[in-house]
Image (cartoon, grey):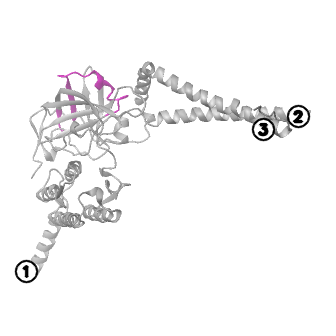
Amino acid sequence: MKKSKPNTRAQKRRKKFLKGLRRFLLMPVLTCLLLFVVVFGITTPFLSDFFSIGSMFLQDNESSYSRTYENIFSPSDNSGDTVDAEDVDYPSIDKQFGTLEIKNRGVDAKLFFGDGYVPLRNGVGVYAGSFIPGYGKTILVSGHNNTYFNGLKNVKTGDIVKIRTSYGNYEYQINKTRIADANDKSTYDLGANEENLVMYTCYPFDELGLTEQRFFVYADKISGPEIVGIYE
Amino acid sequence: MKKLCAVLLAVFIFLISCCSAFAAGINAAEQSVLSNMRSPANMNGHKIFVPTAYINQAEAHFNTIDMTQQQADKINALINAGRSFLEGTGKSNIKELSPSERRTLLSYASQAAAVLKLTAVAGSDETRIKITTKDGTIIVDESNNIIKTTGFSSLAVPIAAASFIFVVLILAAAGLISLKKRELENEEI
């Protein structure tokens, strides 16, 4: 059966309009979407390092921070065995109370209490449901994989993590790294009665967007003052 | 004189019991609250515990205040009432609670927080909680997962894609209008 040709002026105009719609709206949008997907897929592995470098430059720009925070950290020279609980200014959420460094691995960040927007934008953060160094329990620290914890990809077993606080300086030795699902509750033990440091960031490193996996780094305390007199 | 001494002594005892002193450490009153929080509720034969993260956050806050025994007694009474309420619902776990039951449970938490002059607000699903001081300082924020999203801003890619598509749509619409205009001009000629 033959298709009837448009004979009226209105039909011709309609056909032209649809042709125009297809040519100038539908095709460009579909082409752009396709190009975006292809270009994104092909270039991400090559450009991710540049994105990371770029964001690391950006993070040093203090004026880009949209929220401020309180800093209660002042360097201490206490690397002894104990510190009295009364001498510890226990931090509240979003306060910087120390620094965390892994030498030669590209990790050197301000340490905050809490792991919300402010801490992770300005450094790394101790989850408020875990504890501060010296408490004798779990310290769960998170940081962004494209900024302050990007260097976690370089760590090796045996590396030393240095945490400085106003009440003492601590050293932890990395004993294990692990890649696990973000919902895997076996990756930490918030009820542990032994001091252990757990650091994590999103995995794969340099990945854009949401990732389901996390890179965990585990370390044991090797030195630093234990907080005594917590329980009166 | 005896009366005066008695009044002064009463005032002194009252002040000692009500005022906060130094905040360091966990005193006996705070320990009793933490210990009570660790006791499970028996829901239809299932033991339900307060999440460790909540207890740890309470402990962290107790390190910054000095709770009195009176405050601890009030909080413990509310914890016990909350536990009894849970056990009386006949449900097996928190997820089975109806919205009104969750609100009742939250009211116990709010009252307990209020004893320490804190404000407790439930999350959207009423199973998570956020506790703040009067000036807005966050004490507990369990509105998020324990393990956070620590990757590139999740919004960056969708925003870039949406902006790109928006620009393309604008350009396409401009092209279409221009074509139509030319067509109409041709027809007029």
N-terminal label among 1 and 2: 1
Q: Are marks 1 and 3 on the same chain?
A: no
Q: Are marks 1 and 2 on the same chain?
A: yes
Residue A145 position in % (x across, y down): 35, 29
As drawn, the residue found furthest toward the right would be: B189
Q: Residue at point 70% right, 35% down?
A: B173
**Residue A179 vs residue A40: left or right?**
left
Identify which residue, A59 or B49, lies in the foreground.
B49
What stretch of residues is rendered in magenta?
A143-169
- Disc number lying in front (3 or 2): 3
Above or below, B172 against B6 in this view is above
Find disc 3 in the rendering and name its residue.
A14
On the rendered image, what quadrant is the N terminus of chain B found in? Answer: bottom left
On the rendered image, what quadrant is the C terminus of chain B found in? Answer: top right
Find disc 1 in the rendering and name its residue.
B2
- Which mark, by number, is residue B187? 2
